[in-house]
Image (cartoon, helix red, strand yellow):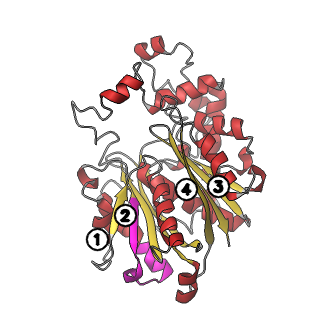
Amino acid sequence: MRDAVIVEAVRTPMGKGRPGGALHAEHPADLLALTLEKLVERSGIDPALVDDVIGGVVGQVGDQALNVTRTAVLAAGFPESVPATTVDRQCGSSQQAAHFAAQGVMSGAYDIAIACGVESMSRVPMGSAVLPGSDPFGPRLHARYPEGLVGQGISAELIAARWKMTREELDAFAHESHMRATAAWNGGEFDREVAWTGQRDETVRPTTTMEALAGLKPAYFTPAHAERFPEIGWNVTAGNASPVNDGAAALLIMSADAARRLGLRPRARLHSFAVAGADPLLMLTAIIPATGKVLARAGLTLGDIDLFEVNEAFSPVVLAWRHETGADLARVNVRGGAIALGHPLGASGARLMTTLLHAMEDRGARYGLQTMCEAGGLANATIIERL
């Protein structure tokens, strides 16, 4: 089995996912194309050598329809001979793209691949793919869950209730995310990974306070949900949840032999992979078994991991994961997470891996673990080893 290594990683700044946001004017295919251009420019690689481009996108409709990754490859000026495909594992789509790219390299199917992702939530709002009057679940799933599934916000509330989290805990975690992201930007820690000078992640709030967060109303309360779930304390707000965003990210992955042949420096080895499923009602807890699964496959323990990236879809998700794994939050999302930086769905997996790689290099870490909760009760987990 061949080693799959990362030789370059880049991302856009994250824009607010609404009209008027910093990236709204960019068509998502162009946004991803610009990122692909930066990736090959930084590496110096001839794009004709790329065996495949695998992109993650959740809203595959409208401006993101018809295999937007292939559109982006052509828009980036890559040779027409370079193929591309678009995958959907919900929020983990581009992390799954990285798994597929690395597994292709390790198996010998590819020598060089790009894993990437994009989401323009200002142009393709979340849920756009569900057409009016359609039912994406079907009668058999409804029969299995006759009481009905719920949206992710209610799942986050159920997690907070099950693990007995207070509003203050959730807000404190969110506040820390903004403070870490602010410190990272002010300290120049994002300068290498963000290829657009003079632009920052638009949803970081440097001046937010615990008092301001405490003043926000519950985001998902309805009388019907309150009746169905009396255990919920209604503590999830816009302040302790991730915002909607526009953004893109990309990773250049190849065999170690190909890197040597091209004179490129392998920066990290894609060490181990796992995917897991869990209760689709709680939905966001599969990162817990996925973490155990990837550690077992790697032959490592939690104590071997120097840095973690755990997607901050909602504060309760990361805090429940920490409660069950015992991980040290000082090593988790050290440059802030999605609550501050943003969560452009299909781009987030590649964004987290880009941030994790650069943080590991700057801190001299050996192992990093990334995990991402996903709609439907799914999760990806990945371990990378800095070289």
Location of mark 3 (residue): 369
Q: Amino acid at mark 3?
A: Leu
In the rendered structure, are the residues bearing label 4 and label 2 in contact, judged by CB atoms less than 8 Å apart?
A: no
Q: Residue 167 location, x and y as percent?
A: 62, 25
Q: Quadrant of residue 347?
A: bottom left
Task: Determine whether the residue tagged by mark 4 lies in a helix, strand or loop.
Answer: helix
Per the image, the residue denoted by label 4 is: 352
- Residue 345 versus residue 366 in the image, above or below: above
Residue 13 x, y percent position in the rendering: 47, 59
269 over 236 or under it: above or below? below
**Magenta part of the protein: which range?**
37-55
According to the picture, the residue beneath numbered tag 1 turns out to be: 75
- Residue 26 in view: no
Q: Which residue is mark 2?
A: 32
Image position, residue 36 (x, y; %): 40, 70
Marks 2,3: beta carbons within 8 A: no
- State the CA–CA distance, disc 2 to disc 1: 9 Å
Of labels 4 and 2, earlier in sequence is 2
Number of numbered discs overlaid on the protein picture = 4
Q: Are marks 2 and 1 in contact (CB under 8 Å)?
A: yes
- Give the CA distance from mark 2 to mark 3: 25 Å
- Quadrant of the image containing the C terminus: bottom right
Pick the front one: 85 or 317: 85
Q: Amino acid at mark 2?
A: Leu
Residue 223 percent location from the top left of the image: 42, 13
Mark closer to the observer (2, 3): 3
The front one of 239 and 91 is 91
Pick the residue in front: 55 or 160. Answer: 55
**Depth-wise, is mark 3 or mark 4 nearer the camera?**
3
**Quarter of the image that includes the N terminus:** bottom right
Give the residue drawn at x 57%, y 31%.
Answer: 212
| Mark number, residue 11 | none
